[in-house]
Image (cartoon, helix red, strand yellow):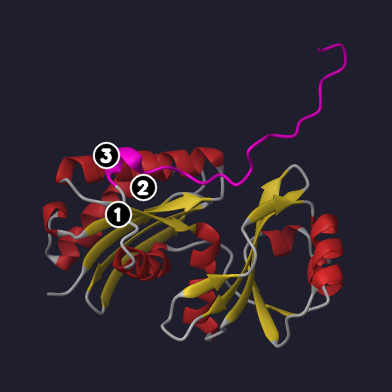
Amino acid sequence: MSTKILAVDTSTENCSVALMMGDEIISRCEYAPREHTTKILPMVDTVLAEGGVKLTQLDALAFGRGPGSFTGVRIGIGIAQGLAFGADLPMVGISTLMTMAQGTYRTHQSEQVLTAIDARMGEIYWGQYRRQIDGDWLLQGKERVLAPDALVQEQNANQTDSGIWLTAGTGWESYAELRSQLNLNAQKGEILYPDSQDMVVLAKYTLARGEAVSAEDASPVYVRDTVTWKKLPGRE
């Protein structure tokens, strides 16, 4: 019997849904800033109808666990939990950064990807990935949030990686000089946002590793634990 997984993601400006049924993937994706709450559930209904399945017939529900927009991540996990509770489905949280690495492989067959999402406040969410023989991805180091200058200094001091690395994410547009400052053969890719059609592929590996959780235990990964802000004049 083929594995059936539904994935939803609202962690960035993109809003996307995908249904995997064995080797077939049905997906919808739309750039829709501030419209996630009105777009996502109709997308879910559309892909389920096209696939001819009901929520209760699925094996798991995957969601974009972050990092990304705090509000977007919360919207996504809230909607995913509601769907999972109603259908009694296990949940699988998938990294948005790793999802973009998978998207870069889908579009360019690149097996080495540098992902960076603009985290605002002069920082980026960062992840560096290598594709494995089985199709899953290996994170080099850990996912983090840091200033571009700090990333350059750290990476260049400890860089031992070779080959071509394609870039993915909005961080490369926000900090255009970053690519040339790294001591890596970093070349421009086309993926700017995570897409559920890539997320659902990663969910298959996560589910196979036994890493699914119950709906009540599903949680976001913000990466940024503290928020840096400047006090207004006269404020304590």
Q: Which is more N-terminal, label 3 or label 2?
A: 2
| Relative height, residue 226 to residue 218 (above, below) | above
Q: Is residue 109 left or right of residue 201?
A: right
The residue depicted at 78 percent of the width and 71 percent of the height is 179
The picture places residue 42, in percent across and down from the top left corner, at 27, 49
Q: Residues within 10 Å of mark 1 (few under 14, many from 20)?
A: many
Look at the numbered disc 1 and give the secondary structure of its residue: helix
Quickly name the residue at label 2.
39
Q: Which residues are magenta?
A: 214-236
Look at the numbered discs 2 and 1 and tell me whether their residues touch, using CB distance below 8 Å: yes
The picture places residue 65, in percent across and down from the top left corner, at 46, 50
Disc number at residue 43? Answer: 1
Q: Quadrant of residue 25?
A: bottom left
Q: Is residue 217 magenta?
A: yes
Q: Is residue 30 left or right of residue 230?
A: left
Quickly name the residue at label 3.
82
Q: Residues within 10 Å of mark 3 (few under 14, many from 20)?
A: few
